[in-house]
Image (spheres, rainbow, N blue to C red):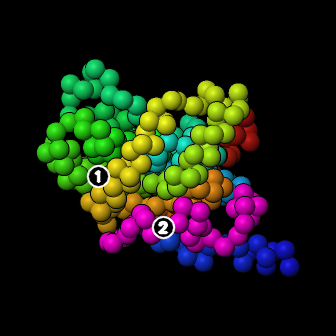
Amino acid sequence: MGKDKKKSKESRTPFRDALRAGPGTQLADIDPRSTPGFSGDKADGQEALADLAEPVSDLQERLFAEATAGGERSVLLVVQGMDTSGKGGIMRHVVGAVDPQGVDITSFKAPTAEERKHPFLWRIRNALPTAGRIGVFDRSHYEDVLIVRVHDLVPRAQWARRYGQITTFEKGLVDKGTTVIKVMLHISKEEQKERLTERLDRPDKHWKFNPTDIDERGHWEDYQEAYQAVIDRTSTDAAPWYVVPADRKWFARLAVMQLLKEHLEELDPQWPKADFDVAAEQKRLKKS
């Protein structure tokens, strides 16, 4: 009975199908509290997330091992979202559930003086995952068509060219063996206000609060327009966007972990074959 109940809570539709932003996807039509592809409640979701840790870790280890035998494949997980959308939680509960030796996390802040001397993709290229590894971007090159666009940090003609540069760049990554998983954590303005309120009400959360977060709320509609443009212009067959409703933290974490699992399963990394005589080495070991 319990097993059947658990089975009924599992997603019948792959998360990558339920969450993929296809042609015509409108962020305004997606309920940030919805749970596409999952019919369970919070407890079911937390249990499902815990159950994913072992198979995802196994797949990650296989990807890493494959590279030791010359494999060239890697994975890049891009996580974007408004302030308080749960990027930190994804890093702790999803990325933190796999072996840290096979994962590289890069958190992109405002460009340094050195980075500003180069084209906007320069610092991104320097942080790409090498063969066998999973790279995770906490924010990414998309800041250069999001905050840069909203605050007019460069001329419109300059940021407008970047959509095409990004899609060409990502297509090149995929062609060279990097699987790109792009996640937009879709939070509502009301939920963001609740999370900011909690940060101000709790002394143990003050360190998370930044007064500029309130300033940015004044540009909420501009950001939604900028994110919609990102979805419209850079969700491609090679590197589609996945819009993850993020008002329910437990669902967002489950969704990202499941997306990672589904993509790794598609890669189906293989354990490398021994380059030595296993039987002979077993005999030698017994005699040692």
Residue marked by disc 1: 170
Mark 2 or 1: in front is 2
Specify the label residue 30 is tagged with. 2
Left or right for 13, reference 115: right
Q: Residue at x 58, y 67 (%)?
A: 34
Could you tell me which quadrant the N terminus lies in? bottom right
Q: CA distance from mark 2 to mark 1?
A: 25 Å
Q: SS class of the residue under badge 2?
A: loop
The stretch of residues the image draws in magenta is 21-47
Q: Nearer the viewer, residue 133 or 199?
A: 199
Q: Residue at x 36, y 62 (%)?
A: 240
Could you tell me which quadrant the C terminus lies in? top right
Q: Earlier in the sequence, mark 2 or mark 1?
A: 2
Left or right for 206, reference 220: right
Query: Residue 45 lies in magenta, yes or no?
Result: yes
Q: Residue at x 49, y 37 (%)?
A: 214
